[in-house]
Image: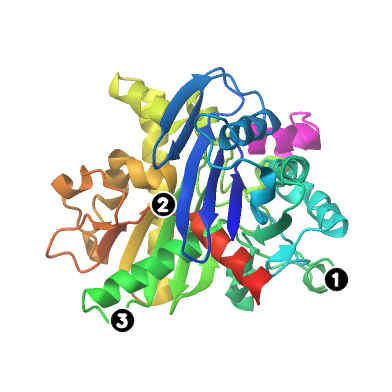
């Protein structure tokens, strides 16, 4: 079964064409920096590797470009869209309506649309991917895999807010959690790695997903028990354009004392804050480059970013009552040796000791970057949300 996986992020599209059940990746690639004049496009097959920098204004244009490449006479890997039996879509917020992978219907799309306010940077892009894919791959089953599903195991003591009870029972206001496909994939790989290396516990892990969106999960015995993102994907860690944790009274002050509208505050917290608000840049590569050249704001933002991650490592180690491994993943987690170093410095009380030389090694494989004496493993595990999504799509359609 040939399955196209579309993972539309807030400023990126990752895609793969996978032959299941062999997990054979026929084609893969991504577009990042969507909305900028310098968007990057990659397209990789066994015989072709294309990279291009071009302006891609939005997700629709990006997805149409990907589809043309897949069917291109020279570099394409399919002759007709009829070869595609399913398209799997990453959808960020499933709310209380979705706890499992589902075939997409008009009713499902309506519910995804109703959740736009809870994930305004993601669900609209996710639904746009669905709509474009329905036009292009019109004979394929469209399937949604929800980021929130993996976090359904978070216990009530962690997922309930200290608000009036009816807001949970009647309005389903609770911690939902996000980046679930990524956290699930890397945690399963981490447990397998630890078991292979004669560390039979492998049950107390913190996964750190760092990209334009960022989150951390406390995982015990393979199950999510706490998570930095909550009702919507904007609290917790400092992100590309999202503020992460902020005192709620700041919002009331902005509205009541400074005259901001609620819409303006929402836009500020979602799209104008985080690393962008601190530095003027949303892409970490730009921030690191400017910090290296002496930009004080950029250096402070990097320090703040790492400080927030450290705080959650401490709290989640307490929740887990121990720690076997921390896992860095996603674009920043996998590629920024500098952020990893900032996070792991002065963490020896938690048994976290970084090997500087190992930290600088780039690889697409699972790797340890801790010293031999480190009690806690420091792992870098490339995430593969697309394989995880493909597995869930195949299981749904064949069982």
Per the image, label 3 sits on a secondary structure element best described as loop
* Above or below, comparing residue 164 to residue 38 in the picture: below
Relative to residue 197, is residue 256 drawn left or right?
right
Q: Earlier in the sequence, mark 2 or mark 3?
A: 3
- Disc number at residue 201? 3
From which residue to which does the magenta span run?
253-271
Earlier sequence position, callout 1 versus callout 3: 1
Residue 70 as seen in the image, left or right of residue 185: right
Estimate how packed mark 1 is, as few (under 14), some (14 to 19) or many (20 or more) residues with alpha carbons within 10 Å. Answer: few
The CA distance from mark 2 to mark 3 is: 24 Å
Q: Residue at x 80, y 32 (%)?
A: 261
**Could you tell me which residue is drawn at 78 percent across and 53 percent down?**
112
Q: Main secondary structure of the magenta part?
A: helix
Q: Residues within 10 Å of mark 3 (few under 14, many from 20)?
A: few
**What residue is disc 2 on?**
309
Measure the alpha-carbon separation of dots 2 and 1: 33 Å
- Say if 23 sits above or below 4 in the image: below
Q: Nearer the viewer, mark 1 or mark 3?
A: 3
Contact check, label 2 and label 3, Cβ < 8 Å: no
Label 2 element class: helix
Is residue 261 a member of the stretch shown in magenta? yes
User: Few, some or many C-alpha atoms within 10 Å of disc 2 (few <14, some 14-19, many ≥20)?
Assistant: many
Between 359 and 129, the one lying in front of the other is: 129
């Amino acid at each position: 079964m040939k399955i196209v996986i579309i993972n539309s992020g807030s400023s990126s599209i990752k895609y793969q064409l996978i032959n299941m059940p062999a997990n054979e990746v026929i084609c893969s690639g991504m577009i990042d920096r969507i909305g900028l004049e310098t968007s990057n496009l990659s397209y990789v097959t066994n015989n072709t590797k294309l990279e291009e920098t071009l302006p891609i204004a939005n997700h629709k244009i990006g997805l149409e470009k990907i589809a043309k490449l897949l069917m291109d006479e020279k570099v394409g890997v399919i002759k007709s869209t009829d070869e595609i039996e399913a398209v799997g879509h990453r959808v960020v917020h499933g709310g209380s309506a979705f706890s499992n992978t589902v075939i997409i219907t008009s009713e499902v799309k309506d519910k995804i649309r109703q959740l736009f306010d809870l994930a305004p940077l993601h669900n609209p892009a996710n639904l746009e991917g669905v709509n474009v894919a329905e036009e292009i791959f019109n004979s394929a089953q469209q399937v949604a895999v929800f980021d929130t599903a993996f976090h359904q195991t978070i216990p009530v003591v962690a997922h309930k807010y200290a608000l009036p009870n009816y807001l949970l029972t009647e309005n389903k206001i609770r911690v939902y959690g996000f980046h679930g496909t990524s956290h699930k994939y890397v945690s399963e790989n981490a447990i397998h790695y630890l078991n292979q290396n004669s560390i039979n516990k492998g049950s107390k892990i913190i996964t750190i997903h760092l990209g334009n969106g960022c989150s951390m999960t406390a995982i015990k015995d393979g199950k999510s028990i706490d998570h930095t993102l909550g009702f919507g994907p904007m609290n917790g860690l400092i992100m590309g354009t999202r503020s992460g944790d902020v005192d709620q009274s700041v919002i009331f002050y902005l509205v009541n004392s400074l005259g901001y509208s609620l819409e303006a505050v929402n836009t500020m917290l979602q799209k104008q804050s985080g690393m962008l608000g601190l530095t003027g840049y949303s892409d970490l590569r730009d921030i690191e480059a400017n910090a290296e050249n002496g930009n004080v704001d950029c250096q402070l933002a990097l320090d703040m970013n790492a400080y927030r991650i450290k705080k959650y490592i401490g709290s989640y180690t307490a929740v887990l009552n121990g720690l076997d491994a921390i896992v860095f993943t996603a674009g920043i987690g996998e590629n920024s040796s500098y952020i990893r170093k900032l996070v792991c410095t002065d963490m020896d009380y938690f048994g976290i000791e970084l090997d500087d030389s190992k930290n600088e090694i780039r690889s697409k494989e699972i790797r340890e970057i801790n010293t031999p004496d480190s009690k806690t493993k420091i792992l870098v595990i490339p995430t593969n949300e697309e394989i995880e999504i493909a597995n869930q799509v195949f299981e749904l359609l064949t069982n």
